[in-house]
Image (spheres, rainbow, N blue to C red):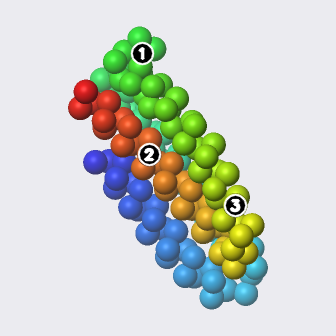
Amino acid sequence: MRYLAIYIAGLFLLVAGMAAAIESELRWAPGAVGALAVVAVGVSVMLVKRGRERKTRSGARDSVEAVRDAAARAAVFPDAVVAIAVALLVTVIAPGIPGALVCLALLIALLIDYWLRVLLAVKR
């Protein structure tokens, strides 16, 4: 639930920042806002995850959670390779679609893929 709250806050930060950055005259502002939102969400998720791992001692290499996480990451890798190729193809075929939007969609799709695999591993 904390991760979802972080992702929603990051999305809000991204939308609010983009709205302000687009109105500014600085050409680099939207890119900087997008990068800041991605970095902020990434660091926040990492800090929350490490804090939870310290509390529950689930960060040990031989723990069930660590094995499940490694399996989910390994399963997402082939999907990421295909998704990156598709994203590159989309940017070549449809140059009217902004590259930042394609990258954001790719990032969201891969995050959803990872978390679905983690949830499915828990159910098994």
Residue of label 3: 89
Please tell me whether mark 1 sits on a helix, a strand or a loop.
Answer: loop
Please tell me whether mark 2 sits on a helix, a strand or a loop.
Answer: helix
Name the one closer to the observer, 82 or 23: 82
Please tell me whether mark 3 sits on a helix, a strand or a loop.
Answer: helix
Tell me the residue at 69%/79% (across/down).
Answer: 96
Q: CA distance from mark 2 to mark 3?
A: 20 Å
Tell me the residue at 65%/75% (across/down).
Answer: 97
Q: Which disc, if any, is residue 44?
A: none
Tell me the residue at 73%/75% (across/down).
Answer: 95
Rendered-image quadrant of the C terminus: top left
Q: Position of residue 112 (x, y in %)?
A: 42, 50
Residue of label 2: 113
- Amino acid marked by disc 1: Ala
Do the residues under discs 2 and 3 have CB atoms within 8 angstroms?
A: no
- Mark toward the start of the polypeptide (1 vs 2): 1
